[in-house]
Image (spheres, grey):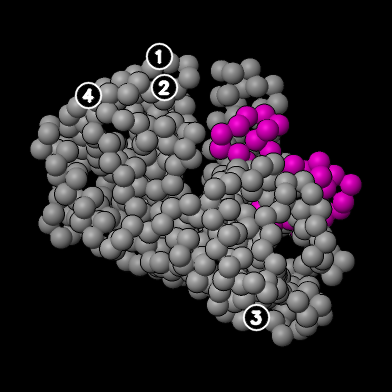
Amino acid sequence: MKFINLTRRTEIGANSYYIEAGGRRLVLDCGMHPKFEGEDALPNFKAIADRQLDAILISHSHQDHIGTLPVLMRRQPKARVFMTEPTAEIGGALLHNSVNVMTRQREELGMTLYPFFTHRETDRAADRWQSCAMRQAYSLSGERVPSNNPDALSLEFFEAGHVLGSTGILLRSEGRRIFYTGDVNFDDQTIAQAAVFPEEEIDILIVECTRGDTPVPSGWRRTGEEQRLAQAIENAFARGGCVLIPVFALGKTQEILAMLYKFRREKLLDFPIYIGGLSAKISEIYDRRASTGRRQLPRLQLLDELRPFVLNAETIHDARARAGRVYALSSGMMVPKTLSNIFAQRIVENPSHSIFFVGYADPESAAGILRNALPGEEVTIDPGQAAQRVRCHIEQFQFSAHASRESIIAYVNRLRPKKVLLVHGDPLAVEWVRARLSLDLPNSEIIVPQPGVEMDL
């Protein structure tokens, strides 16, 4: 068994991992880095340029896990591609949106490498994806196989509780088991139900560490946090302002809409809501699949119940900040030129308005910089624009779609794998998890895989 971390740094970036097992060659995920552009946004595919892949397995359809799939498929035309059906449907929509974004960047920034792929190539790629059912073993030829076959290399998807269609991936080969968590949440969210992961013996565990440097606040409960959000929105409206909530189009938008639905149902609050065009497309998919799979509020149709107004790249420039409204706009990291970034520039210097952060934000992103800014501090939200002074109300809420570090540690301790590979985390987060597991599991090998370095497992 061999492993190469194709992510270019120890970080949450263009996530991608090479596995060699049973004489077969696989890649787990192939994301696009949300912060970098051009070649730096790609995984380190050069590390496997001389190897022919048998399969590419996609855990879920967030951009940092699926964003360069057409690129890898072009370079590896014989590799079969596996994912769940919801991941395929959402992934197609997100990749087409990515083509639009890259085309715009080519025109605005002179990025001659963009777009990495076209709409036509995305459609051709999607035609080759094989959709897999949850908790069913498949061979690399795409056929269902008995999960108790010890010799044949098989793959199996398990519900990860992160976003619609998200999975952990179990590989069985020559009597050994490798499990990749992907992005996981072991707690119920407003829509997504908690992960259902294997509890059987695992030899090698590849586990995410997103929240490794953040403890769960004492006394935190999701219901209490939802009530705190409702009260904060009410307070914001009482100040005569609006609320901006930067969100990811996939996952966080739908979770926030479900919370706002509950506020209406419980007669706590009722107000106009604005979302982005891509968020609306993903919400349509959530609504179509509301009664399938494991989820909370299975009959809830988000768009029918909430009837949000939809903003896009053109209409955002004419959208005034209107009091008594919530703007749940992407991107969650407030990448320059996105709806949330443009709208934030409009309200950041106005003490009547509020910006609420509800999930993970890279500390170096615009969202991370603004979230950590002190009142009155000057910040640059968009490098192409002048610095602005923070006068709006800023508040942080804990609604992460990623597992807490405590639940990650508990899961690893239950499995007690021979080897644990720590991925998908900033250096401080990964180091905390490594140090803790080294104490808890002295008989296990805890590894932080160095980018681009082949490891013999």
Q: Residue at x 56, y 74 (%)?
A: 413
**Disc 4 from disc 3: Cα separation:** 55 Å
Residue at numbered disc 2 = 380
Q: Residues within 10 Å of mark 3 (few under 14, many from 20)?
A: some
CA distance separating discs 3 and 2? 49 Å
Q: The residue under label 1 is which amino acid type?
A: Ala
Give percent across and percent down for residue 144.
70, 76
Q: Which element is circle 3 on?
A: loop
Marked residue nearer the N-terminal end (4 or 3):
3
Q: Which residues are magenta?
A: 27-55
**Neighbour tally class for label 2: few under 14, some 14-19, many 20 plus, Cα within 10 Å:** some
- Secondary structure at badge 1 equals loop
Can residue 309 be found in the magenta stretch? no
Q: Residue at x 70, y 26 (%)?
A: 113
Q: Nearer the viewer, residue 407 or 267?
A: 407
Proximity of marks 1 and 2: CB atoms separated by less than 8 Å: yes
Say what amino acid the circle numbered 2 marks: Thr
User: Callout 4: helix, strand or loop?
Assistant: loop
Q: Amino acid at mark 3?
A: Glu
Residue that mark 4 sits on:
350
Q: Which residue is mark 3?
A: 201
Residue marked by disc 1? 386
